[in-house]
Image: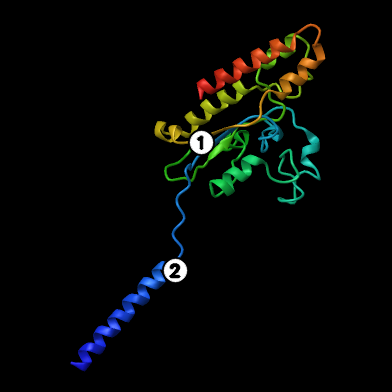
Amino acid sequence: MAASTAARRLCLLLLVAAVAVAAAAPAPAPPPPFRTVYAFGDSFTDTGNTHSTTGPYSYGYVSNPPYGATFFHRSTNRYSDGRLVVDFLATDALALPSFLPPYLSLASSPNATATKGSKYYGANFAVAGATAIEHDFFAKNNLTIDITPQSIMTELGWFDAHLKARQVKQEEIGEALYWVGEIGANDYAYSFMAANSIPPEHIRTMAVDRVTTFLEGC
C-alpha cells in the first residue's frame, strides 16, 4: 500500500512539473500576416532599381559613402545611410527572411522565372525620381531633365510582367501586401519649372488621377 501511495505521489509530482514547464515555455510566434510584399514608389522606397544597368539613369552619388554607412556598411543604392521604411516593414514588422529585391535585378537574372518550391517574398518596383504622371507629358512640355523616365504606371507594367515571368498564382497575388510609397512629389517639383504655363492645380488633378488608375489596376 505504501509503495502504491508513493508511486501515485511521484506521478502527481511529475505531472505538476510538466505543467509548470509547459506554462513557462514561450508561446510560438504567430505567423506573419503577409508572406509576400510588392512595393512601389520613388526614392523613399527604391532599393536599387535606379542603379540597374538595364534601368533608368543611375544616380552615381548613391553608390558611394555615406549611403549605406550606418547599417549595411556599404552602398546598396538605397537613398539612405541605412535602411528604408520598406526594409523595416519586410524584416521587422513581417519577419520576412530578406529585404525585397529591386525588380530590375530580378528581371535581368537568368533565374527570374520561379521554380517549384523556390523561396519567394515579393519584389520592389520603386524607382528614384519616378512620377505619378507619365514622363511623356513632362517631356512634351519641356519640364523634365530626363533623369528618370519612369512613372507609377511603368512600375505597374513591370509588376504585371514580373507576375507572368514567375507564374505567380492568383490566390498568392490576392493575399500579398501592396506597399505604395510616396509618389507625386517629383511631379510637383517639375511643375515649378512652368508654374505660369501649367497651373499647379492641373498637375495635382493629373497626379491624383494616375494614382487612382494605378490602385485600380493592382
| Rendering quarter of residue 50 | top right
Look at label 2 and name its amino acid: Ala
- Distance from disc 2 to disc 1, alpha carbons, whole Å, reads 34 Å
Q: Report the quarter where the N terminus lies.
A: bottom left
Mark 2 sits on what residue? Answer: 24
Residue at the farthest left position = 1
- Disc 2 crowd rating (10 Å Cα; few below 14, some 14-19, many 20+) is few
Residue 59 bears which disc, if any? Answer: none
Q: Looking at the image, which is closer to me, 185 or 69?
A: 185
Name the residue rendered at 71%, 11% in the picture.
201
Colour pattern of the rendering = rainbow
Mark 1 sits on what residue? Answer: 177
**Residue 137 sits above or below residue 153 on the image:** above
**Residue 55 sits above or below residue 71 on the image:** above
Determine whether the residue tagged by mark 1 lies in a helix, strand or loop: strand
Q: Give percent across and percent down for residue 3.
A: 22, 92
- Disc 1 crowd rating (10 Å Cα; few below 14, some 14-19, many 20+) is some
- The numbered mark, 2 or 1, whose residue comes first in the sequence reads 2
Look at label 1 and name its amino acid: Leu
The answer to whether residue 168 is seen in the rendering is no
Name the residue rendered at 36%, 74% in the picture.
18
In the picture, measured across the screen, residue 192 lies left or right of residue 167, that is: right
Name the residue rendered at 49%, 46% in the picture.
119
Determine whether the residue tagged by mark 2 lies in a helix, strand or loop: helix
Q: Give percent across and percent down for residue 83.
A: 68, 45
Q: Give percent across and percent down for residue 61.
A: 81, 37
Name the residue rendered at 67%, 23% in the picture.
150
In the picture, measured across the screen, residue 91 lies left or right of residue 184, that is: left
Residue at the farthest bottom position = 2
**Residue 74 sits above or below residue 18 on the image:** above
The answer to whether residue 12 is seen in the rendering is yes
In the picture, measured across the screen, residue 92 lies left or right of residue 194, that is: left
